[in-house]
């Protein structure tokens, strides 16, 4: 077979091929934001059970054996909000379902300068009163950290997450091109072979969830597409009326118009929810939103729940507040909005049942390990090429220490966040904020520890620390609450029992990694000795060639 490709001129190296070019691209886009991606993957994995984790972090709330009548609950909490938030232009409440045993309510207020313009609280479905549980963000902290981080403006965090997701998408495509035998290598794994073992693990984890990883990365970008690429929307939508129509199409939060100034009590919220139940099912009403409660211009939106439908496009019924008359049923959106809604739902996985949610969790955990093995492989591969492996250069040491704190240290920080939930006094001021502060303080300490200790020793110590914190967490729960594991198993409370058992499983995983790291003896090449006679060395190499 003849080819027109000419060999390179003598003395000039051949141009790198597509695989070599993609290999360099894959390496550096994976490294530059690899620690951000690892944190996003791990916290996003935990967020698939954020509702269950929020229940575990509020042990004062009773175990829910069945979903209460959502219509009755809506009326109880609505009556409470009329008294708590008089004159509020808008309030909204999320009704209890199979995964939530409380009612979360949010309302807007006329904020004074320097104060928040909203209020929020959780309510007991049985009484309609504010719950007396400990103050905590619960699993919502990991969910929000996953895509907007903390201690920075929300927009900045979402931009950083978007750039990291774009890097991830490039890493996925370039990785498939680079590893031409990636599917064959999926069935090959060699223990104790150093760099080869890390590459095998990275390949296997990448192929195992490749469709999921591509979907979750792309759909994550789609969820915030209006932030990253707003120009099409800005060109198409020019008037406030068009903007309001778009908001109504993408969200069930109806826009509060101007109040009439005429007092009129709300009609029965229970009847409105019952109307929605007849259409969508008894336990499938998700949210009730009210604008200008107590005014003649009040409007009520009753939104459908997210379970059982693979789309986040809103479906809701709009009622006239004072009379309860049905004004409109919104169940259809345009093709573009529905495409976004489907991709958004695939990313969040809230439509899923328990089995599907566990599959999301496991494949996402494999994606976390894929990013982690890639970061570790970078240091393993380059350590063997160092002139003196015992004295690596500054850049190598920086990556190595960030790997330790970013991987093992993050596990310690997340476990410390759960420990803080059980140990901080319940009446402590800004308690929820201090749970989060504790997370970042511990995470910073793991970075300091990694910088001060030898790398291999730091890996072992931090992995064992994570294993110990996770293993002892069910013991701490039994000592500080009335919901120990044996009680949860007897009551069939799988939220508490499952959390305790999962902590032990993750503790075992970290212990295995610590043991293997301690047993592994790195194979280091001896430092290269310089030639005594440079001219003789050059002549010798020329003769060998």
Image: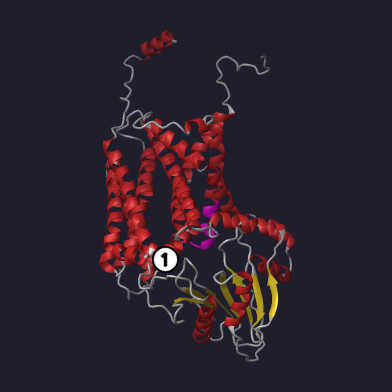
Residue drawn at x 33%, y 20% is 530
| 14 in relation to 245, above or below | above
In front of the other: 216 or 544: 216
**Considering the image in quadrants, where does the N terminus appear?**
top right
Residue drawn at x 47%, y 60% is 143
Percent x, y of residue 411: 36, 52
User: What kind of secondary structure does the magenta stretch mostly adopt?
Assistant: helix
Task: Provide the residue span drawn in magenta.
Answer: 152-162
Residue 243 seen from this side: yes
Residue 167 seen from this side: no
Q: Secondary structure at mark 1?
A: helix
Which residue occupies the extreme bottom position in the image?
263
In front of the other: 355 or 91: 355
**What coloring was used for the rendering?**
secondary structure
Q: Quadrant of residue 421?
A: bottom left
In front of the other: 202 or 542: 202
**Considering the image in quadrants, where does the C terminus appear?**
top left
Percent x, y of residue 170: 56, 42
Residue drawn at x 44%, y 82% is 127
**Drawn side of residue 318 relative to residue 432, left or right:** right
**Within the magenta stretch, is there residue 365?**
no
**Within the magenta stretch, is there residue 153?**
yes
**Mark 1 sits on what residue?**
54
| 1 in relation to 369, above or below | above
Q: Quadrant of residue 53?
A: bottom left
**Drawn side of residue 402 relative to residue 356, left or right:** left
Count residues near mark 1 (Cα–Cα under 10 Å), then give few for <14, some for 14-19, many for 20+.
many
Q: Quadrant of residue 456?
A: top left
**Drawn side of residue 459 relative to residue 344, left or right:** left
**Drawn side of residue 121 relative to residue 246, left or right:** left
Residue drawn at x 33%, y 14% is 533
């Amino acid at each position: 077979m003849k080819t027109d490709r000419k060999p390179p001129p003598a003395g000039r190296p051949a141009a790198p091929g597509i695989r070599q070019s993609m290999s360099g691209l894959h390496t550096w886009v994976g490294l530059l934001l690899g620690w951000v991606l690892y944190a996003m993957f791990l916290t996003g994995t935990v967020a698939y059970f954020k509702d269950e984790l929020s229940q575990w972090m509020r042990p004062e709330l009773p175990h829910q054996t069945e979903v209460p009548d959502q219509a009755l609950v809506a009326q109880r909490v609505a009556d409470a909000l009329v008294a708590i938030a008089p004159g509020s232009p808008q309030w909204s409440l999320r009704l209890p379902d199979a995964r939530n045993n409380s009612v979360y309510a949010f309302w807007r207020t006329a904020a004074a300068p320097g104060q928040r313009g909203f209020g929020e609280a959780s309510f007991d479905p049985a009484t309609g009163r504010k719950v007396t549980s400990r103050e905590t963000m619960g699993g919502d902290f990991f969910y929000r950290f996953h895509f907007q981080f903390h201690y920075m403006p929300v927009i900045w965090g979402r931009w950083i997450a978007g750039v990291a997701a774009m890097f991830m998408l490039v890493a996925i495509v370039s990785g498939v091109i680079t590893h031409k035998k990636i599917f064959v290598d999926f069935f090959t794994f060699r223990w104790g072979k150093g760099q080869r073992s890390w590459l095998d693990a990275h390949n296997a984890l990448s192929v195992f969830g490749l469709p999921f990883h591509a979907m979750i990365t792309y759909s994550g970008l789609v969820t915030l597409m209006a932030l990253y690429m707003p120009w099409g929307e800005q060109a198409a939508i020019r008037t406030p009326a068009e903007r309001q129509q778009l908001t109504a199409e993408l969200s069930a939060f109806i826009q509060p118009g101007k109040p009439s100034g005429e007092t009129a009590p709300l009609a029965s919220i229970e009847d409105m929810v019952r109307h929605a139940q007849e259409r969508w099912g008894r336990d499938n009403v998700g949210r009730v939103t009210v604008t200008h409660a107590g005014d003649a211009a009040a409007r009520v939106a009753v939104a459908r729940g997210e379970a059982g439908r693979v789309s986040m496009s809103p479906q809701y019924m709009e009622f006239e507040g004072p009379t309860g008359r049905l004004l409109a049923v919104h169940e259809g959106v345009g093709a573009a909005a529905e495409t976004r809604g489907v991709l958004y739902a695939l990313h969040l996985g809230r439509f899923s049942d328990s089995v599907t949610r566990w599959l999301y969790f496991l494949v996402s955990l494999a994606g976390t390990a894929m990013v982690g093995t890639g970061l570790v492989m970078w240091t393993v591969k380059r350590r063997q090429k160092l002139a003196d492996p015992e004295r690596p250069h500054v850049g190598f040491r920086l990556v190595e220490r960030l790997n330790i704190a970013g991987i093992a240290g993050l596990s310690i920080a997340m476990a410390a966040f759960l420990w803080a939930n059980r140990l901080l006094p319940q009446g402590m001021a800004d308690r929820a904020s201090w749970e989060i502060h504790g997370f970042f303080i511990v995470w910073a300490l793991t970075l300091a520890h990694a910088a001060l200790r030898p790398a291999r020793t730091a890996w072992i110590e931090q992995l064992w620390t994570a294993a110990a914190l996770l293993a002892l967490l069910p013991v701490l729960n039994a000592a500080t609450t009335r919901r120990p594991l044996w009680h949860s198993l007897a009551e069939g409370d799988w939220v508490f029992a499952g959390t305790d058992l999962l902590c032990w499983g993750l503790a075992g995983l970290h212990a295995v990694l610590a043991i293997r790291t301690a047993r592994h003896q790195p194979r280091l090449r001896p430092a290269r000795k310089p030639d005594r006679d440079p001219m003789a060395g050059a002549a010798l190499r020329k003769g060998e060639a």
